[in-house]
Amino acid sequence: MNKVLDLQEAYISTLIGVMLLLVVIHNNRWRFNVKRRENKILFVLTMSVLFACILDCTIFYLDGKPGALNWYFLFAFNAAMYGIAMLLCCCWMVFIMQYLMGEIASIHLKVMNGALLLTCGILIYNFFNPIFFYINEFNQYVRGPYNDILFCIAVFLLLYLFFVYEYIIYRGGGLKFFPLTSFVLPIISGIVVQMLNYGILIIWPAAAISITGVILSLQNEMIFRDNLTGVYNRRFFDNIHTLIKKKHPFGLMFLDLNKFKEVNDQFGHKAGDEVLKNITQIMRKVVRFSGTVIRYGGDEFIMLINTDDLKVMDAYARRLNFEIANFNAESGKPYELSVAIGYCITTLEPEKLTEAVREADKSMYKDKRGEK
């Protein structure tokens, strides 16, 4: 097969990836302008994959072209592609952790930092001892005998992300809203295909397909998310019996912000919005991956926790009050946060949930009267 035909075939898949990403960027400008951390991470992912698609085509075009300067370009660009691949795997993990829990645990940071440091070390070592890849005397990229190590690190990170995600779903009680397989499998498939067939530019188009799948999933989920706080909303709660398949008991904690109207009246609605955002961040920090935070309406919230033990619920309530006290001590705000709390154990059948909300609400009002 001649070089021109090879070049055209190599560009086709990448061009499809570029077009997909451009459509995603154009149709989601509003999302990228919303100042939430997960949206910023998603924008970085999208732009990085777009850049990688273009860089991959540039490498393929320069491959085999003579010149000493071209040799350095090819080596640097190929090394950069490996680095970008590892960085994007880590960004996926940060995005998932941020989206599902509002934070990322230190153990996951250690895994990601270890993978990135290992990759950087491999690429630096490879410059002096090219055993992973090299550019030959004809300025052609050639895989070294240990090239698969870099691919295996990327696959390890993706599989690690998959198992962490499944663990979060298990601990949270079975809520599986975000279809991780829809964007992990295309990337892993692309890595495997490119490992076995050098000359096919498929990894980055596969990553573009993954990002498109993420965006579509987010679009579907928007109706169940509260626009201000980012946690689930009343519509989600009203349909939760169809969204969580496990029917075992859950702990339901009902919370109401104390003196929220006074904050709005005295400091304005912007301060009130800030209060709602801060309290949801605290709740997500407390519940982590053992449950779900829901904005039930106004300044009322529900925490669904994967437990059937009232003593565990009491521990969560004490932990929540402790974290709120820490926030008040460190925030420097002219107001203090406090909540009234009621809780009970329930299952997710609609009639049981309605009864549980009523019971927890009564318990919460007893707590509120005690606070007053």
Image: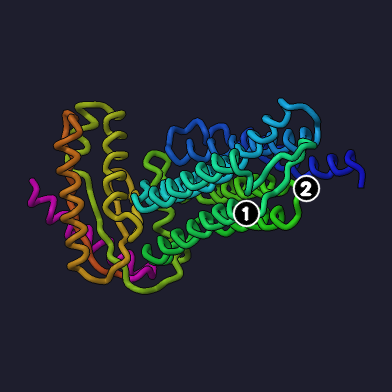
Q: How is the image coloured?
A: rainbow
- Give the vertical position of 309 relative to 130 (above or below): below
Query: Which residue is pictured at 58% across the width and 51% down the height?
Result: 150
359 displayed left or right of 110:
left
Q: Outermost residue toward the bottom?
A: 248
Tell me the crowding category of disc 2: few under 14, some 14 to 19, or many 20 or more residues within 10 angstroms, Cα based. Answer: few
177 displayed left or right of 108:
right
Which structural element holds mark 2?
A: loop
Query: Which residue is pictured at 57% across the width and 40% down the height?
Result: 84
Is residue 356 visible to us here? yes
Residue 228 on image: x %, y % = 39, 39
Q: Which of the 4 image quadrants contains residue 237?
A: bottom left
Q: Is residue 351 magenta?
A: yes
Residue that badge 2 annotates: 199
Q: Name which residue type carries label 2.
A: Gly
Query: Which residue is pictured at 80% across the width and 32% down the height?
Result: 65
Which structural element holds mark 1?
A: loop
In front: mark 2 or mark 1? 1
Q: Is residue 371 magenta?
A: yes
